Amino acid sequence: MVEVSSVKAVKALGSAIELQSVVRSYNWDDGFEIPRAIADHPCCDLAVALELFSLSDGVSVYTGEVQLNGHNREHVEFCQLMSARLLSGHYKPGAAEFKSDLSAVQMYKLRKQGVPELYTQRHK
């Protein structure tokens, strides 16, 4: 597990696997500066981006369940950025792997709500 505490440390990482390790161990109560640095990193691949989107609860923002208010601006803006980048094909498949932890029923319900399958499928 790779732990970093600064944007500078994120920029020094050299692979999608290292970025994904940081994402998985990140304390989301610490804000979105580190996740944004990961999302902007040249090694950030599709799986890492999906992990960021999933762990930041991007689907709730996408579906409108979470709405912008004075307390969650950074969260909503991050999720909107990730959603736009993911849907535009900004991130390409790479070395990291993403497997959604959603059940088949949850995935079905999300598809019925119009959530793109990209957000719920396994990617390598």
Image (tube, grey):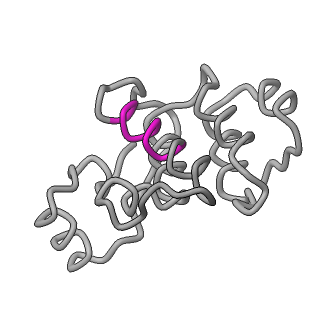
Q: Estimate the x, y position of residue 44 in percent, counting from the top left.
A: 56, 30
Q: Residue furthest front?
A: 70
- Give the residue drawn at x 63%, y 46%: 20
| Percent of width and height locating residue 6 | 87, 38
Main secondary structure along the magenta-highlighted residues: helix
The one of 122 and 5 positioned closer to us in this rendering: 5
Residue 84 in the image, given as x and y percentages of width and height: 36, 33
Range covered by the magenta-colored residues: 78-86
Q: Nearer the viewer, residue 20 or 109?
A: 109
- Which of the two residues, 35 or 46, is positioned nearer the viewer here? 35
Left or right placement of residue 99 versus residue 6 in this view: left
Total labels drawn: 0
What quarter of the picture does the C terminus occupy?
Answer: top left
Q: Is residue 32 above or below residue 92?
A: below
Q: Is residue 43 above or below residue 57?
A: above
In the rendered structure, the answer to whether residue 110 lies left or right of residue 77 reads left
Identify which residue is drawn at 68% across, 46% down. 32
Q: Is residue 27 left or right of residue 103?
A: right
Residue at 29% x, 59% y: name it: 63
